Image: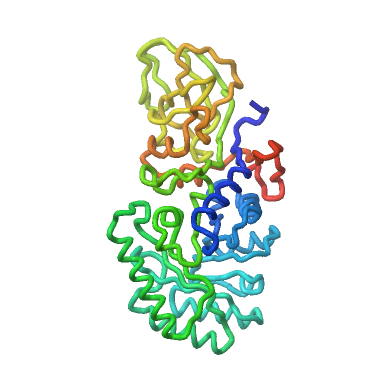
Amino acid sequence: MSPVRAEIVVDLGALRANVRRLTDLVGPEVQMMSVVKADGYGHGMLACAQAAREAGAQWLGVATLEEALRLREGGDTGRILSWLSGPGEDYAAAVERGIDVTAYTRAELDEIVRGAWTAGRPAAVQLKVDTGLSRGGSTLQAWPGLVEAAREAEIAGGISVTGIWSHFACSDEPEHPENDRQEQAFRAALAVAEAAGLRPQVRHLANSAAAILRPSSRFDLVRCGIATYGLDPAPGVTSPVGLVPVMTVRAGLAVVKPIAAGAGVSYGHTWVAEHDTTVGVVPVGYGEGILRHAGNTAEVWSAGRRRPVRGRICMDQFVVDLDADDLPTGTEVVLFGPGFDGEPTAQDWAEACDTINYEIVTRIGGRLHRRYLDRRTSAALTGAAEGVTR
């Protein structure tokens, strides 16, 4: 264990391998978008974006304009799609930097056009249609009006419609009938857009689970988020595709002490020792994004064994049961990692906390140091430029 109290270790070599594996899976006719929103799902946006580009990702996907602009400021020059905005957004900077932005409504399209005139160049716009998620995107009823307005703006020189897309609600359940309904609705929406005269560069519907499980939904491009980071987008359903988890979270034992039978552990004494044992204090807690639901349910890995979490997770620390092992302070504790050595995975923590692996990795941060490794070289990569000591 290094002198660092606790850290996130990100294997960029594994991320590159995941992007290449997914690219091979979907085939050469389908473009790859690596989604790096939410600080790269907790892995660090800039470093992960660069690694994805190096592995051949033609596109990067983010939620907000701020995230897209940060990628540009970090040196990325490739295609970027941003898809979440609110009323009154200033699109001019994104248009100036060649970022594709998304319109859900005519009002949003009008704001993008105003940003384009301010920027002095046409905006690259992708239109999103809601095919059944009932979240972002144009309603099917409003879709003909949106595509007509987009075509008019395109003829006037304010925009170029570069893409049309939608998002699945149930792609992690491949037998769910909504998948067929959504794909059919998307194809119908594409026909409406084509009849209006739109000729988008890319049409895309598939997220990670659909990219792997539903070949008919791949169209021109797939958006791979969680799979980029080596986590299963449909646990128990997805066929093995050789993805490798990218993140490991580790710490060193801060305190080791014996406790007697009958001693309660942590707030509320939700766990009481049934016999004499030894416990260890791990110096991370919900201040670092560890879910409180992990109390008495999750496990860690230390000294060649899984160790159960005992008692409630605190803001800065939690307790694990070392049984009869009197380990020295500083002994490495792996909260989760790839699982190759027997350590828990993010999926294990998700199941222990009754959530999804997305939440486990995107919550992690707080006071944790982030360190980048590359399996090809085993060399630590500096992350100072993007503030990895968080």
Where residue 36 appears, as percent x and y from the top left, is: 56, 55
Residue 142 appears in which quarter of the rendering?
bottom left
Q: Quadrant of the N terminus?
A: top right
Residue sitting at x 56%, y 80%: 160
Camera-side residue of 200 and 320: 200
Looking at the image, residue 17 lies above or below residue 323:
below
Quadrant in the picture for residue 123: bottom right
In percent of the image, x 49 and y 61: which residue is there?
222
Q: Name the quadrant containing residue 115.
A: bottom right
Residue 196 rendering spot, x and y as whole percentages: 43, 85
* Depth check, front residue: 77 or 333: 77
Colour setting? rainbow
Q: What is the count of numbered marks?
A: 0
Q: Quadrant of the C terminus?
A: top right
Counting from the top left corner in percent of width and height, residue 204 is at 46, 66
Q: Nearer the viewer, residue 309 or 315?
A: 309
Query: Does residue 229 appear left or right of residue 77 in this picture?
Result: left
Against 172, residue 129 (above or below) is below
| Residue at x-position 65% and y-position 50% | 47
| Depicted 310 relative to depicted 100: above or below | above
